[in-house]
Image (spheres, helix red, strand yellow):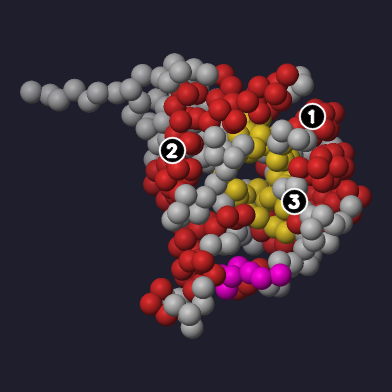
Amino acid sequence: MAVEILKEKYTGKVNTVTIGTGDKAMTVGGATALPFHSFEGEAGNRPMIAYEILDMPPEDSPAAQKEAWDAHWGDPAQWARYCQNELSAKAVALRLVSTDPDGKNAGPEDAAETVKKVLAAIDIPLIILGCFKEAKDGQVLKAAADAARGRNCLIGKAQEENYKTIAAAAISNGHKLIAFSNLDFNLSKQINILLTQTGFNINDIVIDPTASALGYGLEYTYSVIERIRAAGLVQNDAMMQPPMLLDLASVVWKVKEVKAGEDQLPEWGNVSERGTHWEASTAVSMLTAGAEILVMSSPKAVQAVEKTLDQLMK
């Protein structure tokens, strides 16, 4: 007697969002079932990984990052070109850390020049990230959006204090937008509603519900992502159907588990390998929860996750 495999029925679909131009443009989203449940619906487009590049060298970076990027820190255009030409990157994410008012406090004009140099060095899609200080990001991302006009970038992160300014800049320059919320389903929906009220198209939005590294906080992050994806697919909630971006590079490389040296905790093993595995494990967890775009740092971690995606997308 044949056993009937019970299948979930979905009424919604994850929106598709395309960033970049020409034959290097990338499209994410499009799933009609939960992640990798191809037996229940369409898997959609392959999730995309963007390499993080910084416009200013970090003050204190873990061993795995130093080994991978020491030769490129200080020149984001060279770094981006290396990711594209040597690592076969599908996209890069430029983080404008120099604009942080608590740090170097570089101005919007400086950020715009950096964006122009990076775009001149690559033809793959570019994600432009501010310093994550709402007031300053409003100024910086407006200038960055102007500088990247016509390149269909993904810019962010739009938050309650700055979303109107960033949305207007994205609309006028033809970019997509990252809508940020801090691990709260209702806040994630609210920022999407606010953005659409400014005239921004919901089909040009990517959700960032906040990422957490493997370990403390991962379970809660996972559950919020699952709720967002279920609302879009099961409940057919249009405000919860944009693809999701998880900014792993900004959280994984700050935790003790990837920074503590072998002299402090020799029982934890090689610090470089540990950091790589920590980022890769976090990434796979976020993919199975529902992420379509990951911002990552370690080339070895990216390679491991791409191999896993090869298997999961079959």
Q: Is residue 307 visible?
A: no
Q: Earlier in the sequence, mark 2 or mark 3?
A: 3
Name which residue type carries label 1: Lys
Q: Quadrant of the C terminus?
A: top left
Q: Nearer the viewer, residue 59 or 129?
A: 59
- Which residue shows up at 74% across the image and 23% down it? 200
Name which residue type carries label 3: Cys
Question: Is residue 26 magenta-colored?
Answer: no
Relative height, residue 285 to residue 40 (above, below): below
The count of marks equals 3
- Residue annotated with mark 1: 164
In the image, is 6 to the left or to the right of 35?
left
Q: Nearer the viewer, residue 183 or 292?
A: 183
Q: Circle 2 sits in a helix, a strand or a loop, which is it? A: helix
Relative height, residue 209 to residue 16 (above, below): below
Local crowd size for mark 1, using a 10 Å CA cut-off: few (<14), some (14–19), many (≥20): some
Residue found farthest to the bottom: 263
User: What range is drawn magenta here?
Assistant: 59-65
Local crowd size for mark 2, using a 10 Å CA cut-off: few (<14), some (14–19), many (≥20): some
Residue found farthest to the right: 109
- CA separation in Å, label 2 and label 3: 27 Å
- Which residue shows up at 79% across the image and 29% down it? 164
Q: Earlier in the sequence, mark 3 or mark 1?
A: 3
- Residue annotated with mark 2: 223
- Which residue shows up at 57% across the image and 19% down it? 238
Q: Position of residue 158 (x, y in %)?
A: 72, 36
Q: Which mark is residue 131?
A: 3
Name which residue type carries label 2: Ser
Relative height, residue 59 to residue 194 (above, below): below
Local crowd size for mark 3, using a 10 Å CA cut-off: few (<14), some (14–19), many (≥20): many
